[in-house]
Amino acid sequence: QKEVEQDPGPLSVPEGAIVSLNCTYSNSAFQYFMWYRQYSRKGPELLMYTYSSGNKEDGRFTAQVDKSSKYISLFIRDSQPSDSATYLCAMSAEAAGNKLTFGGGTRVLVKP
Amino acid sequence: SQTIHQWPATLVQPVGSPLSLECTVEGTSNPNLYWYRQAAGRGLQLLFYSVGIGQISSEVPQNLSASRPQDRQFILSSKKLLLSDSGFYLCAWSNPGAINTIYFGEGSWLTVV
């Protein structure tokens, strides 16, 4: 079993819809949770990070962490074709130093 | 502002040939530096990380090596490439102690033929 599980997709939605992405994990020591966006043949770009449980909102993006369920989510409101990309979740435990554990990524297609 | 440069962007190398990928970071001092590999359709795998000049930690035993000859320079090398070394290689940096903010370069596509 992988330490971080993420549905590879693709997830296809019409423009303007809400995109819902999630990751599950098995390591209860994870404290820091991040979402990255990666366009085709480009490096990942940090979108959001949260510490421990709770919600965080930044513009059209909302990240949620439920540590009791070992489940994190990213919601994209009013999706645009430019949101078409692969979204990677990543997480880290304090004791792990500078090491992030990544999910495999979910490919998202927003159709005009 | 900080920037990260990685090159070459694309390369095709024969099996058994050497490899050198280079990465530099500008606008920061004493960054933590990382090399990741992303195989097709798979997540990112940490290969090496460095917290200072000459300090390299290897995460995955393989025929790759890394060096940090200068504070903001990180090099990924191989003496003899294998077919399995093909993939997307990403250099990344973070501020010391900031494990929740790692920034990636544009990546290098390596195809071993």
Image (cartoon, rainbow, N blue to C red):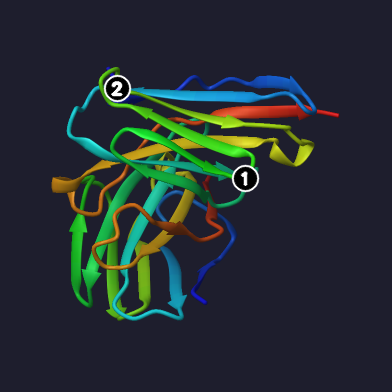
Q: Is any atom of residue B64 visible in this view?
A: no
Chain letter of the residue beneath label 1 in the structure image? A
In terms of sequence position, does the residue under pointer 2 or pointer 1 come before the other?
A: 1
Mark 1 lies on a secondary structure that is: loop
- Residue A103 seen in the current view: yes
Name the residue that disc number 2 marks: A70
- Residue tagged 1: A59
- Note whether B12 is above or below A87 in the view shown: below
Q: Amino acid at mark 2?
A: Lys
- The quadrant in which residue A17 appears is top right
Residue B112 image point, x, y percent: 50, 47
Q: CA distance from mark 2 to mark 1?
A: 25 Å
Residue A37 position, x and y percent, is 56, 43
- Pointer 2 chain: A
- Spot the residue most to the left: A95
Asked whether the residues under the numbered discs 2 and 1 touch, taking CB atoms below 8 Å apart as contact, a structural biologist would say: no
Of the numbered discs in the image, which one, if any, rests on residue B89?
Answer: none
User: At 44% across and 75% down in the image, what residue appears?
Assistant: B25
